[in-house]
Amino acid sequence: MYRRRQKAFTMIELLISIAGLSIVLLGLISGYLGCLRINEMSKNTMIATEDARRVIEQMRKLAVDDLASITSENWTTWAANNGCTALDAEQISVAYTDRDASGNALDDDPLEITVTVTWQDGGRSRVLNAGILITVR
């Protein structure tokens, strides 16, 4: 009588295919987690950009009469009181640049303004700067 050869996977073949599949899945999961991290960083950058835009829009509203109303405002406090604190350790600061070299940046027209948003993103400090020139309308 002959012995019939059984057609099936051996244990070694199964272990090798499971090991190969595990390596492929590990690569896919690591790529997916990387995409999630990049997505979170992008979302936080958009939030910071929106917060800087809100501060700049408020400055534009105040620039109807004179520029002194902009420079006399405490923008860090304004941002904190108006919901610009969605990010971890978010701080907003405003700086004025002396464009005419008079020694006083606050008397320039147009007024050069830099809004800086800083926050923590995954344990790293991130900074976004937005600059604008504002003049009396």
Image: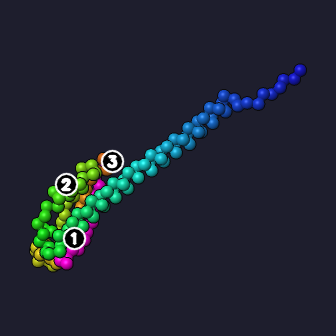
Mark 3 Cα-neighbour bin, 10 Å: few <14, some 14–19, many ≥20: few
Residue lying furthest top in this view? 1
- Mark found first going from the N terminus, 3 or 1: 1
Front in this rendered view, residue 17 or 63: 63
Would residue 110 be seen by someone viewing this image from the given angle? no
Front in this rendered view, residue 16 or 112: 112
Residue position for label 2: 80
Three-letter code for the amino acid on which mark 3 is drawn: Gly
Quadrant in the rendering for residue 54: bottom left
Residue position for label 3: 122
Answer yes or no: do the residues labelled 3 and 1 have beta carbons within 8 Å?
A: no
Q: Main secondary structure of the magenta part?
A: strand
Image: 26 above or below 54:
above
Q: What element carries label 1?
A: helix
- Mark found first going from the N terminus, 2 or 1: 1
Q: Residue at x 15, y 57 (%)?
A: 77
Q: Position of residue 127 (x, y in %)?
A: 28, 58
Q: What element carries label 3?
A: loop
Image: 117 above or below 27:
below
Q: Is mark 2 on a helix, strand or loop?
A: helix
Answer yes or no: do the residues labelled 3 and 2 have beta carbons within 8 Å?
A: no
Q: Which residue is drawn at 17% across and 74% down?
A: 64
Q: Using residue 135 as the reference point, say whether residue 7 is left or right of it.
A: right
Q: Give the numbered dot on residue 94.
A: none
Count of all numbered marks drawn on residues in the image = 3
Nearer the observer: mark 3 or 1; the answer is 1
Q: Using residue 3 as the reference point, say whether residue 97 is left or right of it.
A: left
Whether residue 132 is in magenta: the answer is yes
Per the rendered image, the range of residues in magenta is 124-137
Q: Give the numbered dot on residue 60.
A: 1
Which quarter of the figure is the C terminus placed in?
A: bottom left
Q: Where is residue 55 in the image (x, y as percent from the top left)?
A: 23, 63
